[in-house]
Image (cartoon, rainbow, N blue to C red):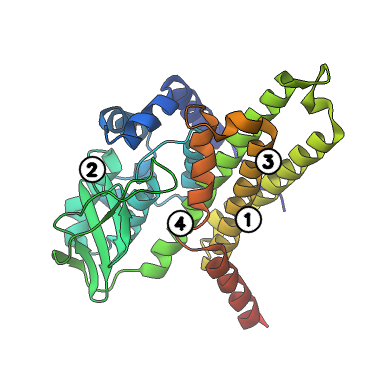
C-alpha cells in the first residue's frame, strides 16, 4: 500500500518547512535549553497560527480536528526543524480533555496557541513544566490540573527540560480516554522522530560531499554510501507506518510506527555521528540538536520494548 499526501497536505508541509527554516530554530533551541523561552514562545505562536494545534482540537471547541493525518504531516516538519517545547504533550492533552466543562475552558486556548500544555503520569517527570501554562497529571483517580512544578532536572536532550509536577490539584476528568491519548502521543512522537531522522540524513549527505580524505569526498566511498543507504531505507520504511497509523489510529499500529520511526532516527543519528567524526560530538555544532533529540524520542511515550510487546500481543489476539 502506498501513502501519498494530497496537494493540500503537501502545501501545508511546505508552508511549515518554509516558516521554520526562516525562524532559525537552532538558536531558538539553544535559548530554550538555557531556560530562556521568549523566542520559543514566539515560535509556538507562529506554529499555532499555522493551525497545527487546532488539528487536535474538536470543532465545537474552536478547533478543526481531530485530524491525525495532518497532525502527522505537521509533526514530521516540527521534528525536521528540531522545534522545542511540549508539542506532543499539548496535542495529547487535547485528546484527554473530553469532559465538556474542562474542554470548553482549556481547549480553545490550546488550539490557538495561547496556552501550552504538558502532561505526565503521576510521579513521573513532565516535559517543560517550567514553560507550560497548563500542567496535567494522570493520576489513579483521573486527569488533574497540577498546581505547580518542581525544579528542572537534566536530560540527555538539553532542550527537553524535565520537571516533577506538584501533587493534588483540580480533578478535570475522572475517567479520561488514556488508551486513545497514548495512541496520539505515540503517533506524533513517531512523526517527530521521522522528521528528526530525515534532517540528520540530509545534513550528513551534504557533509560527506564536502569532507575529503585522500583527496576525494568521503561520500564517494562505498562503505559511506552503504551506511547512508541503510539509513534512507529505514526512514522510508517507517514513513508508511506513521501515516498508516494516522489513518487507523490503532494502538498497535501507532506502537509499530513509533518503534520503526524512532529506531530509524536513532540508527541515522549513529551514522551521522560516525560520518561527521569529532565535530559531531561538539555541542556548538548544530548536528547535536538532532542527535540528542533522536535519542530522547526513542524512549518517550513508551520504550521500544513496550511498543514491541503491544504489537506482538495485538497480533496474538488476531490469531
- The Cα atoms of the two marked residues, 4 and 3, are separated by 21 Å
- The Cα atoms of the two marked residues, 4 and 1, are separated by 14 Å
| Residue nearest the viewer, comparing 117 with 262 | 262
Q: Earlier in the sequence, mark 4 or mark 2?
A: 2
Which numbered marker is on residue 115? 2
Q: Residues within 10 Å of mark 1 (few under 14, many from 20)?
A: many
Q: Residue furthest top?
A: 215
- The Cα atoms of the two marked residues, 4 and 2, are separated by 22 Å
**Residue 202 appears in the rendering:** no
Give residue 99's position: percent from left, percent from top.
23, 64
Q: Which residue is mark 1?
A: 260
Q: Nearer the viewer, mark 4 or mark 1?
A: 4
Q: Secondary structure at mark 2?
A: loop
Q: Secondary structure at mark 1?
A: helix
Q: Residue at x 24, y 45 (%)?
A: 132
**Is the residue under label 2 in contact with that under label 1 (CB below 8 Å)?**
no
Q: Earlier in the sequence, mark 1 or mark 2?
A: 2
Q: Secondary structure at mark 4?
A: loop
Asked whether, in this view, residue 34 is left or right of residue 268, the answer is left
**Is the residue under label 3 in contact with that under label 4 (CB below 8 Å)?**
no
Q: Quadrant of the C terminus?
A: bottom right
Q: Residues within 10 Å of mark 2 (few under 14, many from 20)?
A: some
Q: Which residue is mark 4?
A: 300
Q: Earlier in the sequence, mark 4 or mark 1?
A: 1
Give residue 149's position: percent from left, percent from top.
19, 54
Amino acid at each position: 500500500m502506498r501513502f501519498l499526501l494530497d496537494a493540500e497536505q503537501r502545501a501545508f508541509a511546505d508552508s511549515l518547512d518554509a516558516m521554520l527554516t526562516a525562524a532559525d530554530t537552532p538558536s531558538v533551541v539553544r535559548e530554550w535549553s538555557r531556560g530562556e523561552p521568549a523566542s520559543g514562545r514566539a515560535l509556538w505562536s507562529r506554529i499555532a497560527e499555522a493551525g497545527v494545534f487546532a488539528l487536535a482540537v474538536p470543532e465545537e471547541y474552536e478547533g478543526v480536528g481531530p485530524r491525525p493525518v495532518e497532525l502527522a504531516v505537521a509533526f514530521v516538519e516540527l521534528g525536521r526543524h528540531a522545534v522545542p517545547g511540549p508539542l506532543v504533550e499539548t496535542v495529547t492533552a487535547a485528546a484527554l480533555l473530553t469532559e465538556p466543562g474542562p474542554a470548553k475552558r482549556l481547549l480553545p486556548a490550546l488550539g490557538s496557541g495561547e496556552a501550552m500544555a504538558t502532561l505526565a503520569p503521576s510521579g513521573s517527570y513532565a516535559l517543560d513544566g517550567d514553560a507550560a501554562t497548563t500542567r496535567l497529571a494522570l493520576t489513579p483517580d483521573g486527569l488533574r490540573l497540577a498546581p505547580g512544578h518542581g525544579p528542572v532536572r537534566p536530560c540527555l536532550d538539553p532542550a527537553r527540560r524535565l520537571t516533577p509536577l506538584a501533587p493534588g490539584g483540580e480533578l478535570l476528568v475522572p475517567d479520561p480516554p488514556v488508551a486513545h491519548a497514548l495512541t496520539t502521543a505515540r503517533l506524533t512522537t513517531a512523526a517527530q522522530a521521522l522528521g528528526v531522522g530525515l534532517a540528520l540524513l540530509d545534513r550528513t549527505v551534504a557533509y560527506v560531499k564536502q569532507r575529503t580524505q585522500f583527496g576525494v569526498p568521503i561520500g564517494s566511498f562505498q562503505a559511506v554510501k552503504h551506511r547512508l543507504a541503510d539509513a534512507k531505507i529505514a526512514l522510508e520504511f517507517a514513513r508508511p507506518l506513521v501515516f498508516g497509523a494516522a489513518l487507523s489510529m490503532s494502538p498497535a499500529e501507532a506502537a509499530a510506527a513509533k518503534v520503526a520511526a524512532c529506531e530509524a532516527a536513532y540508527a541515522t543519528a549513529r551514522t551521522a555521528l560516525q560520518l561527521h567524526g569529532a565535530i559531531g560530538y561538539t555541542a556548538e555544532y548544530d548536528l547535536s540538536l538532532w542527535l540528542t533529540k533522536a535519542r530522547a524520542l526513542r524512549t518517550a511515550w513508551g520504550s521500544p520494548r513496550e511498543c514491541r510487546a503491544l504489537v506482538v500481543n495485538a497480533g496474538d489476539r488476531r490469531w
